[in-house]
Amino acid sequence: MPKKSAPSLPPAGTLVRYCGRDQKRARNVRVLAEASGGCMVVEAVGRAGKLVRLTVKQSNLFPKQPDLFDQGLMAENGPEAS
């Protein structure tokens, strides 16, 4: 049987989507560093509008979906500029 490869870690500074216990409150976060036990240290905007640091499971981090502004940027600069 082939071994499963470990999931790739997002590099520091990457914007990703965090979906925790409640799927309705998914948020965009910035990856800061790798922590122990399959966790990542991320930075998000808290309820008061201040930046907060969280330690979350890597399995709850997903790639950020392209949005309207990403599409406009690619149309202006072309796909090779990304």
Image (cartoon, grey):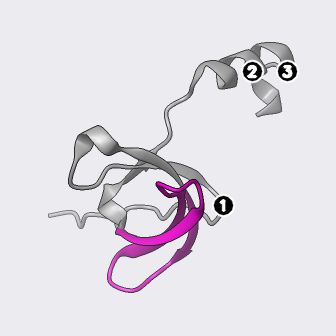
Tag 3–tag 1 contact (CB < 8 Å): no
Residue found 39% across the figure and 86% down from its top: 36
| Span highlighted in magenta in the image | 30-56
Mark 1 residue type: Gly
Separation of disc 3 and disc 1 at Cα?
23 Å
Mark 2 surroundings: few (<14), some (14-19) or many (≥20) residues within 10 A: few
Q: Give x and y (percent) for residue 79.
A: 75, 23
Residue 66 position by quadrant = top right
Mark 3 residue type: Asn
> Horizontally, is 17 left or right of 38 in the view?
right
Callout 1 secondary element: loop
Tag shown at residue 77: 3
Residue position for label 1: 13
Mark 3 surroundings: few (<14), some (14-19) or many (≥20) residues within 10 A: few
Residue position for label 2: 74
Separation of disc 1 and disc 2 at Cα?
21 Å
Mark 1 surroundings: few (<14), some (14-19) or many (≥20) residues within 10 A: few
Quarter of the figure with the N terminus: bottom left
Residue 71 position by quadrant = top right
Q: Nearer the viewer, residue 18 or 24?
A: 24
